[in-house]
Image (spheres, grey):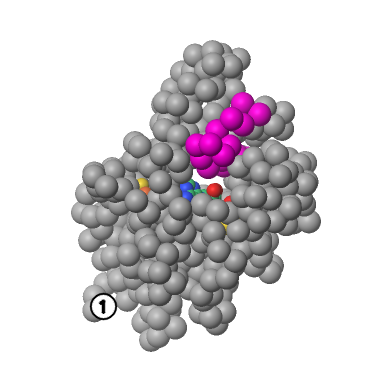
Amino acid sequence: MFGSRSTRDVGAGPGEAPAPVTDALGRPLRKLRISLTDRCNLRCAYCMPREEYTWLPREHLLSFDELGRLVRLLAPLGVAHLRLTGGEPLLRPSLADLVARLGAVGGIRSVSLTTNGLLLADSAAALRRAGLAGLTISLDTLRRERFTTLTRRDELPAVLAGLDAAVEAGFERMKTNTVVMRGFNDDELVDIVEAARARDVQPRFIEYMDVGGATDWRPEHVVPRPEILARLEARYGPAQQLENRDGAPADRFAFSDGFVVGVISSTSLPFCRKCDRARLTSDGHLLKCLYAHEGLDVRSLLRGTATDAELAERLAEEWRAREDRGAELRLAEPMRGPFVAADALLRNPHLEMHNRGG
Ligand code: SAM
Ligand code: SF4
Ligand code: SF4
């Protein structure tokens, strides 16, 4: 299973940027999304529609030491940008310590966080001090009753307090994420842009995806990118598309007075050909695609007898074999429904969106 190459074979000399390992379609490995927990304090209808789940055993969650070792081995393969997510990553105690620790790994250029914002008011300043660069806060509605219907929790005021505390803390890059659902929040796009602009935060709109957890997904619930843009242009005038930054999932559009909105068209215009990210479930399965059915069991390797060199080679081998382009293949399906049926999710929690990190 393991090759005999040393970690130096996949690394770089001092000061050199490492040559990233590339997959079977020539895509480099640049980014890693790390799900820190499968638990969440909200129950968004598009992600965790039920109250109870088959929770992962807590002893299966990767420890900070294990995450540190893994990131140290992945950096020489090309990983430079980390995003911490979940479930709800702020439920993980001492998160700021992890941010500082991962940010100190050689080759890691940024550590960012995606959160529902509920616990952010108390932690934003500490996260900023720990070196967190990017912060994305999910904000699907500004209407309290809608928020409660969507998430089953009456917590919009706490989320907005978290957003304001984060603005106050002064992160380099702040964004909001809005999953656009026809007939639910598609009449709020301008309101959300205004709320974000007022705080100098970039709003991003995400097409509703048919991922695990989205068991109520229907094609007619998706508001495709042209329609999202048309609603914004009706208010702000014509938008101009900006050049795409390497591998970024959001296409960015500038409006006449200079503000920029991101649109993630994963459902109608997948960007798999440029996809340079791997995902890690909270219990240590490395997924090569959001739609992958299974991943490499890194937890067993980390807790087994593999040396760093052996583990690094196994990780590189995994990426080199990658052919995944899940969203593109989903688009080609004639009778598209939810990606995973509810009963299959009960049998295999690894297929859940909240476990693989969105
Ligand atoms: N709990 C955190 C949060 O909500 O920001 C982080 C985890 S959440 C799974 C990460 C992102 O995935 C969120 O921005 C969420 O809106 C997005 N997401 C979850 N389910 C989705 C779906 N069915 N379609 C599109 N985006 C989805
Ligand atoms: Fe929780 Fe985030 Fe999923 Fe909502 S989208 S249920 S906040 S993990
Ligand atoms: Fe990448 Fe898979 Fe998403 Fe395509 S569907 S962009 S390959 S994670």
SS for dot 1: loop
At which x and y percent is residue 181? 51, 40
State whether residue 47 appears in this view.
yes
Residue at 46% from the left image edge and 18% from the top image edge: 240
The residue tagged 1 is 2
* Mark 1 C-beta to ligand 3 under 8 Å: no
Per the rendered image, the range of residues in magenta is 174-191
Q: Amino acid at mark 1?
A: Phe
State whether residue 200 appears in this view.
no
* Quarter of the image that includes the N terminus: bottom left
Name above or below for residue 204 compared with residue 128.
above
In this picture, residue 209 sits left or right of residue 116: left
At which x and y percent is residue 116? 64, 52
In this picture, residue 357 sits left or right of residue 296: right
Name above or below for residue 286 compared with residue 268.
below
Q: Is residue 256 magenta?
A: no
